[in-house]
Amino acid sequence: MKKKLKIYPSQVEDFLKENGVTTIGALATYFECTPNTIRRKLAILREEGAPVLPTNRGIILANKVQGEDMAILVLKSAYWLVRTLMSLARIASITKKPLLEARKIKALSPEDRKQLRQTLLMITHSIDMVEIDEELSPHQLKM
């Protein structure tokens, strides 16, 4: 039995840079590992700030949007994310009463609250950045 090679997130990132849109299955086949290993490496890349996005055609590294096809993929991914966040907001408003009841049994720990607060702040900042970018036109940036 041959020894499995260690796969580094940077290797996955390099592959995405060279090959564009790629499925998790194709990455797993290329690196001779499981899809879960690739998902873990992609999660690490995202934590490090790499713009690794899921699309309807596979995973994409959106360092630089080149061409209309890539722009459409990035936009579709963003619209999917916004719809997901809106659905989560609806679910959150529906679960308010059950959540209050559940708190009587088991409350969130201070660490859980801190993590939830950081996540919500990150989402809020992302939404604000998109709104600001849309408000600024190229004409306003001329000096």
Image (cartoon, grey):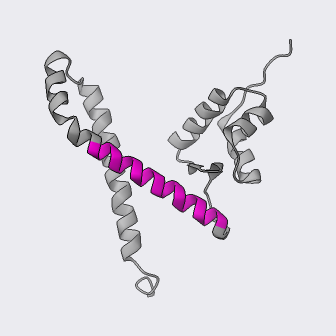
Q: Position of residue 102 (x, y in %)?
A: 19, 22
Image quarter (top left, top right, bottom left or bottom right) of the C terminus? bottom left
Identify the residue shown where x is 43% and y is 82%.
141
Is the residue 142 above or below the residue 30 in the image?
below
- In the orientation shown, which residue stands out farthest toward the top? 1
Q: Which residues are magenta?
A: 69-90
Q: Quadrant of residue 91?
A: top left
Horizontal placement of 119 versus 54: left or right? left
For this rendering, which residue is in front, 12 or 80? 80
Q: Quadrant of residue 10?
A: top right
Q: Position of residue 30 (x, y in %)?
A: 79, 36
Is the residue 66 above or below the residue 44 in the image?
below
Identify the residue shown where x is 40% and y is 47%.
84
Is the residue 48 above or below the residue 103 in the image?
below
For this rendering, which residue is in front, 32 or 98? 98
Identify the residue shown where x is 78% and y is 28%.
32
For this rendering, which residue is in front, 84 or 16? 84
Q: Position of residue 65 (x, y in %)?
A: 62, 64
Whether residue 122 is visible here, answered yes or no, is no
- In magenta segment, residue 46: no
How many numbered marks does the figure carry? Answer: 0
- In magenta segment, residue 78: yes
Whether residue 99 is visible here, answered yes or no, is yes
Identify the residue shown where x is 20% and y is 18%.
106
